[in-house]
Image (spheres, rainbow, N blue to C red):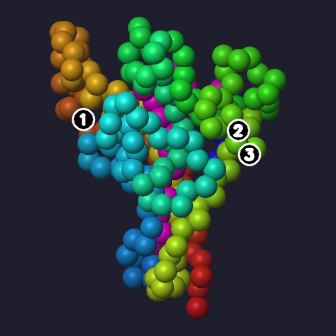
Amino acid sequence: VENQAGHKLPTGFPARRAWLHFQVTDASGAIVFESGAVDAQGRIDGNDADQDHSQFEPHYLTIVQSDQVQIYEAVLRDSSGSVTTGLMQASGYLKDNRLLPGGLDPARALESVRPVGQSSEDPDFFGGEDSLQYAVDLGEAPRPLTVTVELLFQSIGYRWAENLRELEGVQIEQFLRFYDGLPNAPVVLAAVSEVVGGP
């Protein structure tokens, strides 16, 4: 994945997230493997945070099963070290693997912009790009196979909106009406598809 922006991707408000949707289909078009699919509510299949507000998906070097998904995001922590989506409770990051701008050396960057979590130990996560390996068993699926990868983006991650439902306030109610009135469909930032394993 290559970041061609002059800033982290995604940037700005930490509700934003980008992720890889990786899909393999067989010769008949049937899905053999998929990681990072999104449902009609805007939830990412396999994303721990979308199922449980106290969890989050780690940064991966290799994905080996469908319930693992590479999500580029900032995950906030409160003063006790728990996950939070409340900006007033945030005191740091548990994870920040947003794609760095080209030329930024994480080791020489200010501490406030360095990667946090497992991405800080990823040897191929550096200024401008990240590399990820998928090592999955495709069995005897009829060849050829079509491998498609999309980099998807949401301006409001599912968990950020859902956590607001526990709170009260006119602005919160108004925001949730807007949020519920529109599909939380992701935007495709980039995509590539290749046919492999032909006869």
Examine the structure image and report whether residue 84 is included in the region drawn in magenta.
Answer: no
Disc number lying in front (3 or 2)? 2
Label 2: few (<14), some (14–19) or many (≥20) C-alpha neighbours in 10 Å: few
Residue 5 x, y percent position in the rendering: 65, 33
Circle 1 SS class: loop
- The amino acid type, in three-letter code, at marker 3 is Asp
Label 3: few (<14), some (14–19) or many (≥20) C-alpha neighbours in 10 Å: few
- C-beta proximity under 8 Å, tags 3 and 1: no
Which quadrant holds residue 82?
A: top left
- The amino acid type, in three-letter code, at marker 1 is Leu
- The amino acid type, in three-letter code, at marker 2 is Glu
Residue highlighted by disc 2: 121
Residue highlighted by disc 1: 182
Q: Which of marks 1 and 2 is nearer the N terminus?
A: 2
Examine the structure image and report whether residue 18 is included in the region drawn in magenta.
Answer: yes
Residue 111 x, y percent position in the rendering: 71, 17
Circle 3 SS class: loop
* Cα gap from disc 3 to disc 1, whole angstroms: 37 Å
Magenta part of the protein: which range? 7-25
Residue highlighted by disc 3: 124
Which quadrant holds residue 97?
A: top right
Residue, x 42% and y 25% (percent of image)?
83
Disc number lying in front (1 or 2)? 2
Circle 2 SS class: helix
Residue 82, numbered label: none
